[in-house]
Amino acid sequence: KAGVTQTPRYLIKTRGQQVTLSCSPISGHRSVSWYQQTPGQGLQFLFEYFSETQRNKGNFPGRFSGRQFSNSRSEMNVSTLELGDSALYLCASESGRGAETQYFGPGTRLLVL
Amino acid sequence: GESVGLHLPTLSVQEGDNSIINCAYSNSASDYFIWYKQESGKGPQFIIDIRSNMDKRQGQRVTVLLNKTVKHLSLQIAATQPGDSAVYFCAETNTGNQFYFGTGTSLTVIP
């Protein structure tokens, strides 16, 4: 089975711009979670989607949004980028059938200038 | 809110020695735990998991121990190798819908 894929792998944006990141989960997985990782911080949970519905949400401002498509692929969008949004954005997929292993993609490294 | 913490932010071990990485969690209702390894520039990689109905689980060179009484999780790596150098995260969940991660322990293996 192919693993979790994320595109793009690297991205440079300027303040005020918006960005869309994409995640394709493992085939058959219906849950996709997004995380932000910055130096010195742990993984901070953004949101989780299951069957095209946002099931859980972390404590991030409304500039961070996401969606999931019928094929379970997910996108996250960050509008009005700030310097502090520079981070590694990780998505993880799991079956969605309760407490199961989350498998991570390689991440998208976003740099905001 | 949830709190998953690691006792030591960094750990250095000699090649060939055993490594022990610890993790404390605060939610006594957590029923599933995972250890991840993250190498520089990569996403976290699943190492081993354990459910709350178990105290110990072994994999290849790795063992996870769960002490529910004190809400403590540990990862033991036998015969640590240079390729084991990475940041290790523990994660917990009590519903399967959201995982909570520790800040990570950086393991350095000295040749």
Image (cartoon, helix red, strand yellow):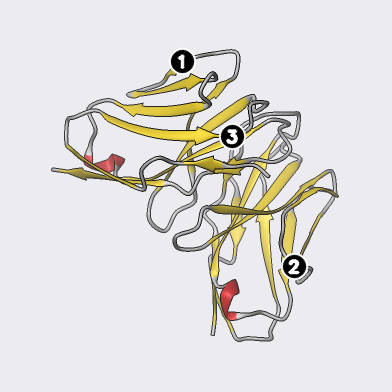
Residue that badge 1 annotates: B56
User: How many tags in the picture?
Assistant: 3
Q: Is residue A64 left or right of residue B68?
A: right
Residue to which mark 3 is pinned: B26
Mark 3 chain? B
Cβ atoms at labels 2 and 1 below 8 Å apart: no
Residue B68 found in image quarter = top right
First in residue order: circle 3 vs circle 1: 3
Which residue is outermost to the front? Answer: B70
Q: Separation of disc 2 and disc 3 at Cα? A: 26 Å
The residue positioned 24% from the left and 33% from the top of the image is B80
Tag in front: 3 or 1: 3
Q: Residue B7's spot in the image, x, y percent? A: 40, 40
The residue at 74%/29% (across/down) is: A98
Q: Are marks 2 and 3 on the same chain?
A: no
Is label 1 in a helix, a strand or a loop? strand
Label 2, label 1: how far apart the Cα atoms are: 40 Å
Image height of B14 relative to B71, above or below: below
Number of the label disc, if any, that sits on residue A17: none
Q: CA distance from mark 3 to mark 1?
A: 19 Å
Spot occupied by residue A64 in the image (x, y as percentages of width and height)? 74, 67
**Which kind of residue does numbered mark 1 sit on?**
Lys
Q: Does A57 sit above or below residue A21? A: above
Q: Which mark is residue A61?
A: 2
